[in-house]
């Protein structure tokens, strides 16, 4: 059963200028994205910087208001809910930010950071401080930190430890759904593996459902059940993660896959080098947004936008040349 259903989600940011600060145009950040996430699944979203991944994740949580489209969480349409209507759902939907340092209040200790969320959402009885401290100790142990860490400030931790704090803060309110916005992109490779394995363990332990945002197809292949590839605000391909290397067909997705490092240093493969620049989201081209850089472009690609349609079982692509 789907926990999250997104249909035709669109976000256009107005661009203003002139004497009267009038709207001159719009930046098309997300354009008609649709997907479902079943309970207990991890959906990966990949693409270049600026393709709309983070905007999509924040819209799903209503941290950014969508221009149009619908978002249904556990059967409830949350698209038009006001602040009071969203409050009961805020506890069930959490986010792990890309930069843990900027998302943690530097003036608060870890204990104060976690207590703030626990008390606001009334996770446990706040009348007993000792019980709250026991709960915080359990949270820190769950993410691999010592109990004495609760007395420290965020700047006293390493990058990997701060990311664990960000995970602990998200888990503090016992959520069902988490948006992980590039949670390992700023970490060393060895620390990335630790954080990813931690997230997988927590997913199994608490039955979490996740939207995992990344620019690394190797990470997504290891971590996710299903993968969406985004380009310039559009989903250009949807494929199960176990079939990522064998079945990916869209020219942009193939170029992303070929850009990943090869595990075997003796193996060689042709490098796909995309020509041209990414079009401006302020002035989108007609037809396929990838047409100006695609090595397989046809005249039809330049004039008609390809729909995201099923090519094989469990596999969708938005491309006129993919059969």
Image: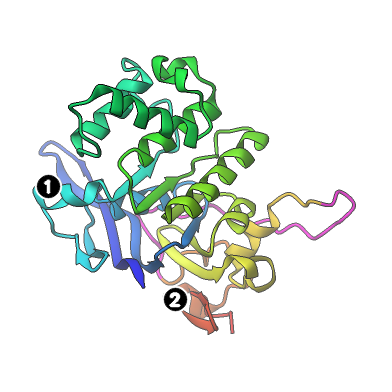
Q: Which residue is mark 2?
A: 308
Predominant secondary structure, magenta span = loop
Contact, mark 1 vs mark 2 (Cβ under 8 Å): no
Q: In the figure, 57 relative to 250: above or below?
A: above
Residue 270 is a magenta residue: yes
Q: SS at mark 1?
A: helix
Name the residue: 27% across, 54% down: 12
Name the residue: 54% across, 50% down: 200
Name the residue: 26% across, 33% down: 117
Query: In front: 173, or 300?
Result: 173
Q: In the figure, 124 relative to 211: above or below?
A: above
Quadrant where the N terminus sits is bottom left
Q: Quick one: label 2, few (<14), some, or many (20+) residues within 10 Å?
A: some
Residue 85 is a magenta residue: no
Q: Which residues are magenta?
A: 264-286
Left or right: 299 with respect to 270?
left
Residue 172, horizontal then vertical, whole percent: 34, 38
Left or right: 250 with respect to 76?
right
Residue 183, horizontal then vertical, whole percent: 49, 41
Residue 219, horizontal then vertical, whole percent: 61, 51
Residue 294 visible within the image: no
Name the residue: 56% across, 77% down: 298
Q: In the figure, 46 relative to 299: above or below?
A: above
């Amino acid at each position: 059963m789907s926990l999250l259903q997104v249909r035709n989600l669109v976000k256009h940011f107005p661009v203003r200028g002139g004497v009267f600060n009038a709207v001159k145009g719009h930046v098309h950040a997300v354009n008609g994205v649709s997907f479902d996430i079943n309970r207990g699944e991890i959906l990966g979203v990949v693409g270049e910087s600026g393709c709309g991944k983070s905007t999509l994740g924040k819209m799903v949580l209503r941290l950014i208001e969508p221009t149009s489209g619908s978002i249904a969480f556990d059967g409830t349409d949350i698209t038009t809910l006001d602040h009071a209507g969203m409050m009961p759902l805020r506890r069930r939907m959490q986010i792990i930010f890309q930069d843990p340092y900027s998302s943690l209040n530097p003036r608060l200790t870890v204990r104060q950071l976690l207590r703030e969320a626990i008390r606001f959402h009334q996770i446990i009885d706040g009348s007993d401080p000792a019980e709250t401290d026991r709960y915080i100790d359990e949270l820190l142990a769950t993410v691999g930190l010592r109990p004495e860490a609760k007395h420290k400030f965020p700047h006293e931790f390493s990058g990997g430890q701060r990311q664990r704090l960000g995970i602990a803060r998200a888990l503090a309110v016992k959520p069902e759904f988490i948006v992980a916005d590039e949670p390992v992109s700023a970490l060393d490779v060895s620390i990335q593996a630790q954080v990813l394995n931690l997230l997988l363990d927590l997913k199994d332990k608490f039955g979490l459902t996740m939207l995992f945002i990344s620019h690394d197809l190797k990470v997504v292949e290891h971590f996710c059940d299903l993968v969406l590839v985004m380009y310039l605000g559009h989903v250009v391909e949807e494929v199960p993660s176990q079939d990522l290397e064998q079945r990916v067909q869209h020219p942009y997705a193939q170029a992303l896959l070929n850009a990943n490092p090869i595990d075997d240093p003796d193996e060689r493969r042709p490098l796909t080098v995309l020509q041209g620049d990414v079009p401006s989201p302020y002035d989108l081209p007609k037809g396929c947004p990838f047409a100006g850089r695609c090595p397989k472009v046809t005249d039809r690609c330049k004039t008609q936008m390809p729909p995201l349609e099923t090519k094989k079982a469990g596999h969708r692509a938005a491309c006129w040349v993919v059969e």
